[in-house]
């Protein structure tokens, strides 16, 4: 997996066009379809998503499969496309492109009618690329609950907001709580904008998503109390800032960022301010757990005395100023956290100084071998089983044959897959440990064992029935040692699974050596 912030995770997953028709399934193909067709299969597909939206029956679950191609006004689309309850648009990945102009919204999930139909999480946009419009997706209500799911989307180059979430009409208390999974929003004025004038008992949930190279990554403007939960997300490269929160009148936002990276944002990583007019209003609260805030103008800025902050197992470093806090210290809790410039270092579990990133200058905020943030007691920031890179949350990072968690968004992995494993390409594994130590990298043609073996060198994760040596190397000083092998350009290898684990010499290990974490790969085309 690439970790540089300019190379973001692939959001869209292909959907096989040969899938059989199911009850409630409909088909759209901009290149081969016609709106005069029945829409019941690929051979009789409609041409436009707009026609599909109007033609499919309501009141029950319906799925519209959308073939690759460019869907735009030039191809017959009429924007915005209003998505009703229980309708699902399923694209074929990044090749299914919905393209607008800078004056239109592409998709809407909206309720403005008294006693309108609620939209639940079964209503879905999936595996589409939205680009070049004013707003990518609008989600809002002044009456009914609106809780759609956005999954495996790429949203790019919106003149306004990538995703716009709003609620109004406090007397009706509409619940607006979308769920975002594996969404990448890039080069928009605001990546995710949330403006709510009602209180919500359900959180806005954002999982495994990236907000990259926007002017503002994420913007919240709350007039009543609300809650947002981000897990394993990136907010990077903001030309103005990363996450900006404003609370007002009757309440603010409670924001949780777990296993997440907020980095390389010009003016601020996280900015929280409260402009409430009433003392009873709940101020903003920010919790950063198992996360990294780095290379921002300011890491965290709390602009008012009422706002609160919690840091747990976090790293705040390489910022112009790590913390700029106007809040009363009674509203701030910092534990098991490294803050480079020394803020809160008097707390015994906290650290100061250099966290030893791989290369902050090139956008790699993983930890290097020997970082003080590796294998820290009480480094439990979140309940997530994996870190931002998909590694297990407890790895034996210091090679003492005992597994503990790390501070920050990235768990240090002594064995790390650099790049991707594709036919005709190069398999590259980074191996880290004490300078001069010998390391034997083992491999297996099987997936990792569900029940690892306990050994004097720590846990062994490869199949004991089928493994062997892959390479023997000596660890160099400084940068990890690269273990490489060419992958044959053979189509039959696609889908094959291999597993790797290294035994690395270590003076901290009771037996003189320790097993690294295991790495499992599947060969891609």
Image (cartoon, grey):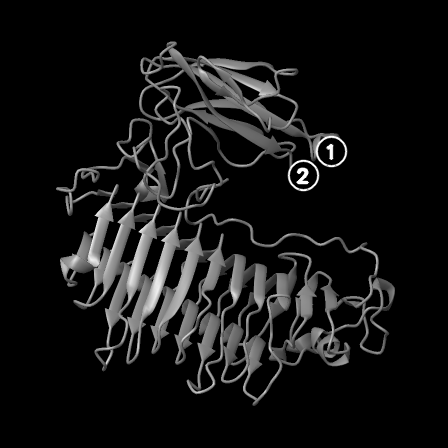
Q: Is label 2 in a helix, a strand or a loop?
A: loop
* 3 displayed left or right of 310: right
Looking at the image, which residue is at 71% across and 77% down?
53
Residue 407 visible, this angle: yes
**N-terminal label among 1 and 2:** 1
Other-residue count near label 2 (Cα within 10 Å), few / some / many at <14 / 14–19 / ≥20: some
Where's residue 54, x and y in %? 73, 81
Q: How many marks?
A: 2
Quadrant location, the C terminus: top right
Name the mark on residue 491: 1
State the residue position of label 2: 525
Task: Give the residue furthest to the top.
Answer: 511
Residue 434 picture location, percent across and down:
33, 18
213 or 303: nearer the viewer: 303
Q: Nearer the viewer, residue 408 or 432?
A: 408
Q: Residue at x 57, y 89 (%)?
A: 113
* Residue 194 lies in quadrant: bottom left
Residue 263 visible: no
Q: Is residue 363 above or below residue 497?
A: below
| Secondary structure type for disc 1 | helix
The answer to which of 471 and 100 lies nearer the viewer is: 471
Q: Position of residue 512 (x, y in %)?
A: 37, 10
| Image mark for residue 8 | none
The part of the image, by quadrant, that contains residue 166 is bottom left
Discs 1, 2 touching: Cβ within 8 Å? yes
| Pick the front one: 220 or 347 | 347
In this picture, residue 124 sits left or right of residue 509: right
Residue 443 at x, y = what percent? Answer: 58, 19
Question: Relative to residue 444, is residue 246 drawn left or right?
Answer: left
């Amino acid at each position: 997996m690439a970790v540089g912030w300019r190379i973001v995770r692939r959001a869209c997953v292909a959907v096989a066009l040969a899938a059989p028709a199911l009850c409630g399934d409909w088909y759209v193909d901009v290149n081969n379809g016609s709106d005069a067709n029945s829409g019941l299969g690929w051979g009789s597909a409609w041409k436009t998503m707009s026609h599909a939206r109007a033609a499919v029956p309501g009141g029950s679950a319906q799925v519209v499969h959308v073939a690759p191609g460019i869907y735009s006004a030039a191809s017959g689309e009429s924007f915005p496309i209003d998505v009703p309850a229980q309708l699902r648009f399923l694209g074929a990945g990044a090749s299914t492109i919905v393209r607008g102009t800078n004056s239109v919204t592409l998709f809407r999930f909206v309720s403005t009618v008294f006693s309108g139909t609620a939209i639940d999480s079964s209503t879905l946009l999936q595996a589409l690329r939205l680009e070049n419009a004013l707003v990518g997706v609008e989600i809002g209500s002044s009456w009914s609950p609106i809780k759609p799911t956005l999954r495996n989307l790429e949203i790019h180059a919106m003149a306004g907001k990538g995703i716009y979430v709003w609620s109004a009409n406090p007397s009706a208390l509409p619940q607006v709580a979308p769920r975002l999974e594996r969404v990448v929003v890039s080069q928009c004025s605001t990546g995710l904008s949330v403006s709510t004038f009602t209180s919500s008992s359900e959180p806005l949930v954002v999982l495994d998503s990236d907000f990259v190279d926007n002017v503002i990554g994420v913007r919240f403007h709350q007039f009543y109390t609300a809650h947002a939960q981000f897990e394993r997300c990136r907010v990077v490269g903001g030309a103005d800032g990363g996450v900006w929160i404003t609370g007002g009148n009757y309440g603010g936002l409670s924001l949780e960022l777990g296993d997440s990276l907020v980095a390389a944002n010009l003016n601020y990583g996280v900015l929280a301010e409260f402009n409430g007019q009433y003392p009873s209003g709940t101020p903003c609260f920010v919790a950063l757990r198992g996360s990294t805030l780095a290379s921002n103008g300011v890491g965290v800025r709390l602009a008012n005395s009422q706002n609160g902050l919690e840091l747990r197992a976090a790293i705040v470093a390489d910022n112009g100023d790590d913390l700029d806090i106007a809040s009363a210290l009674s509203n701030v809790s910092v534990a098991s956290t490294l803050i480079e410039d020394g803020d809160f270092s008097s707390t015994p579990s906290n650290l100061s100084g250099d966290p030893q990133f791989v290369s902050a200058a090139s956008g790699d905020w993983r930890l290097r071998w020997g970082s003080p943030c590796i294998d820290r007691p009480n480094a439990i920031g979140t309940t997530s089983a994996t870190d931002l890179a998909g590694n297990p949350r407890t790895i034996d990072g210091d090679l003492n044959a005992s597994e503990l968690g790390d501070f920050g968004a990235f768990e240090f992995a002594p064995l790390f897959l650099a790049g991707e494993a594709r036919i005709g390409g190069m398999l590259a594994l980074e191996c880290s440990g004490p300078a001069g130590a010998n390391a034997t990298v083992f491999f297996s043609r099987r997936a990792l064992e569900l029940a690892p073996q306990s050994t004097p060198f720590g846990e062994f994760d490869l199949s004991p029935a089928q493994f062997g040596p892959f390479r023997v190397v000596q660890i160099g000083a400084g940068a990890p040692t690269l273990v490489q092998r060419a992958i044959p350009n053979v189509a039959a290898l696609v889908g094959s699974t291999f597993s790797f684990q290294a035994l690395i010499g270590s003076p901290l290990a009771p037996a003189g050596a320790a097993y690294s974490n295991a790495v499992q790969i599947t060969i891609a085309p």
